[in-house]
Image (cartoon, rainbow, N blue to C red):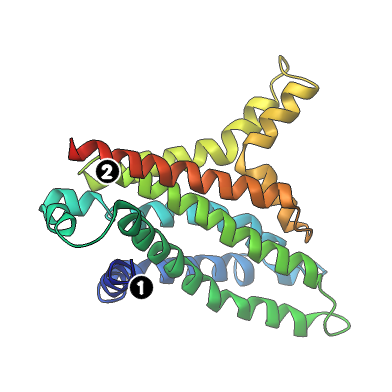
Amino acid sequence: MKSILYKEIHTFLSSYIGFLAMGIFVVITGLMIWVFPQYSVLNYGYSSLEMFFSLAPILLLIIIPAITMRLLSEEKQTGTIEWIYTKPLSDWQIILGKYFASILLIVIALIPTVIYYFSIYQLGAPVGNIDNGGVIGSYIGLVFLSGAFCAIGLFASSITANQIAAFIFAATLCALIFWGFDLVSSFEIFDGMIAYILKNIGIAYHYDSISRGVLDTRDVIYFCSIIFIFLYATFFNLEKRKY
């Protein structure tokens, strides 16, 4: 698994893909938080990173599929997947190696955004007047969210050898699971317990829950379940291809 992990990280960081993804994420969030007046925290009147944590999932919904679209699609397209199968690696080692490589790249992209926290920390009146628990919870929520999106993206990449198709499918599926159930639960035909269940199926509900600063085991179990389901679906696709 380590060999696959190192290979993918080297591929990401030795080409424009990794740096472009990280650069786009940091630049856009920086512009939205500090420059554009309608979103700038300088116009809020209070120290908060709420805008960043509301915007980040939308950007990750585009950036993560762009990163994961090539993980297995490119291997199929170039035929190197057959070469990988000749190595003493199990399907799970291949999948987990590529999965953790994509998550690591997103975590690296999130690290520079910590400067936003320290900046707002210093700008607070008094200094340090910021919800530290909410910030920590929101960053944990972003990591879980990234893990779910990476699993979905890897699954999409295992379906087709066309990278563009993998990107479109992954981005659409991420959007549907993130917002779709929440939107459907708001329909008038659904009320009470049904609406509550539908809302709980969506990622947005659990991301918002963790972002409040309270790490509920139900939210952790939910994200772990989503990750496992899509990683297992990827494993199933690789196994099916052998036959």
Viewer-closest of 146 and 130: 146
Q: Residue furthest front?
A: 88
Query: Is residue 39 visible from the viewing direction of this image?
Result: no
Find residue 134 and report its horizontal and vertical position in percent. 77, 65
Q: Is residue 145 left or right of residue 131?
A: left
Rendered image: mark on residue 19: 1
Mark 2 surroundings: few (<14), some (14-19) or many (≥20) residues within 10 A: many
Find residue 49 and report its horizontal and vertical position in percent. 71, 67
- Secondary structure beneath dot 2 equals helix
Q: Amino acid at mark 1?
A: Phe
**Residue found 30% across the figure and 46% down from its top:** 157
Find residue 86 and report its horizontal and vertical position in percent. 14, 58
Classify the position of the N terminus by image quarter. bottom left
Dividing the picture into quarters, in which one does residue 189 lie?
Answer: top right
Q: Residue furthest top?
A: 189
Viewer-closest of 199 and 34: 199
Q: Amino acid at mark 2?
A: Leu
Dividing the picture into quarters, in which one does residue 29 lie?
Answer: bottom right
Classify the position of the C terminus by image quarter. top left
Q: Disc 2 designates what residue?
A: 238
Q: Is residue 164 left or right of residue 188?
A: left
- Secondary structure beneath dot 1 equals helix
Viewer-closest of 187 and 86: 86
**Residue found 71% across the figure and 69% down from its top:** 136
Find residue 176 and report its horizontal and vertical position in percent. 51, 35
Query: Is residue 180 visible from the viewing direction of this image?
Result: yes
Precedes in sequence: disc 2 or disc 1: 1
